Image: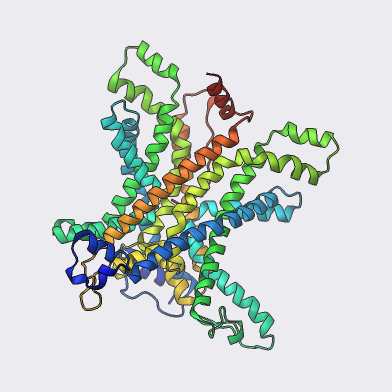
Amino acid sequence: MFSFCADPQNLEGLTWLSCYLTTGKHMSIYYAVGTVLLLLAITAPIALGFGFGGAVAARSRIAPLRWFGKSYVAIVRGVPDIAFFLFFVIALDQGFEYLRHQIKCPDWDLPIRQGNDFVVCAAAKLPLSTSPQYVHEIYGFFLAVLTFSIVFGAFAANVLFGAMRAVPKAQIETAEAYGLSHRQTFWRILVPQMWVYALPGLSNLWMVLIKATPLLFLLGVEDIVYWARELGGTKTPQFTDYPHPDWRMWYFFGLLVFYLCFTKVSEIVLTRIMRKLTKGQATLGGEAQRREVVA
Amino acid sequence: MSCWDTIADYALRSQGIGPKLLPRSDFTLCQQVTLIGSGMIWNIYFGVLSLFAGFFLATTVAVAKAARSPWIRKPADWFVFIFRGSPLFIQFFFAYFLFLSLKGVSPAFAPLTSAWLGALVVLFLNTSAYSAEIFYGALQSIPKGDIEAADAYGMSGWRRFRRIVWPTLLRLAWPAYTNEAIFMFHSTTLVFFSGFPATQQRGDALYYASYFADKTFNPFVPYPILAVYFILLTLTVIGIFGYVNRRLNRHLPQDRKQSMKLRMNLIR
């Protein structure tokens, strides 16, 4: 990276460290931080969408849809989340391959599950075995996003379902008295008002989502945990210009500090948003703000 | 081989009692149910011990957090912030490699690098921090009248804490604490997926479930089995904590009784 890094043997102290932390391999861990942020940025809106769908389904007047919504919310409560992560990645992958298999190879007559193997025709493989490495990585990341969205969608559904019920009943009754249809009441009265009630739950969910990102490692994505283990392990002079003993402890200490800073910053930002949103609201928080201004 | 034989062979496999080799092919449903159930022993072990020990540390930290002196309050604040602000998964990894380095310094630290003690320490500190926050919240919402009444009776210091503050604190915190307990049992599944090795394939329930899922490439059998086990465990925890809740509130008039409202569990 820097010009003085040409001969690592002669470096000492901080200069050595600055060279060490900017080697090509270390760039991968910085990219991995980007991957984590990208995952958060993509997952959050999709999970919110899933959550909205789930909450609407749980409130539906059509019984099967209601059952589906309710069980979607309920099932994540009793079972460890990490089990879902491990389950969905394989299940989704097999589901997609099975669907493609049905479409692309209709005249295939062997069973798909042969003993301990899951066999689909070559054209149905996802991604195709001929495709380049980056396609495999993107597909893995895509599966991870979908898995995170399904699990966190259930959490968000729970929060939004509660928020929809927290909207004062009088508001709905007034809308009905004005002759608004069920659909109109939902979109024009309920949805705009529910966000204030949902925000504390959703911001809590955001913190939890941040803390769930290291689980990407379990889904086979090369994320920061992967690189911390990889880079921290003992390195001998044989393979690198920067030999060192087992430094994994320090790498994970770095990750710990990274996550602490990340949650702290989110906390500060979310408090600000909450302050903005409560302004002028007829809630306890809004009332407290009014009193502050007067005083 | 009948199912009873399988149970006799593998029921204690997670503790190292039983055949050395795990089944390798032709997995029967019975084998999966037995081995995953055997793994549950670890989950219960970690959950029960860390919750029990964590309860005491949590009470101490909660009281320290409410202390006036910054010398007592600040360390408690930091303790809670560090364990609640970072992912448990990273805590496990960091602790494991820390213990490994300590082992290099002195062999006295060797037991800490194995899951039964090392992971237990991490889970204990983690649940203490989460419970401390719950207890601190409850401590802040103890009715002023209760304290004033205690003062009027001439109670102070330890006696007031033991007779008035602590029971009220428990009553207020109990529903949230139940949630924390459920959640704690779920967190125990992370142990063998982070640094800590499952020596001789003695793992917890999720370890065996993922073993079967990897071998059979069929996630639709082992994970639902695991789910059933955990739902049963969750119901048991709710039952026990509900009993304690009724006992804590038994002197209150019927309409003031708090019903147990359970919140959803979240990843930590």
Does residue A39 appear in this view? yes
* Above or below: residue B159 compared with residue B219: above
Judge left or right: residue A159 versus residue B201.
Answer: right
Direction from residue B256 to residue B211 in the image, left or right = left
Count of number-bearing discs? 0
- Residue plotted at (32% across, 73% down): B19
Question: Closer to the camera, B122 or A271?
Answer: A271
Q: How is the image coloured?
A: rainbow
Above-or-below relation of B129 to B203 = above
Image quarter of residue A96: bottom right
Position in image of residue A253 (x %, y %): 30, 55
On the image, which quarter does residue B22 sit in? bottom left
Quarter of the image for the N terminus of chain B: give it: bottom left
Q: Residue at x 54, y 72 (%)?
A: A139
Give the farthest residue toward the right: A179
Quadrant in the picture for residue B188: bottom left
Write the residue at 48% across / 50% down: A208
Give the residue furthest to the front. A3
**Horizontal and vertical percent position of residue A205:** 52, 48
Whole-percent x and y of residue A95?
60, 72
The answer to whether residue B51 is visible is no
Q: Is residue A123 left or right of residue A183?
A: left
Expressed as whole percent of the image width and height from the top left, the position of residue B213 reads 47, 71
Closer-to-camera residue (A181/A282): A282
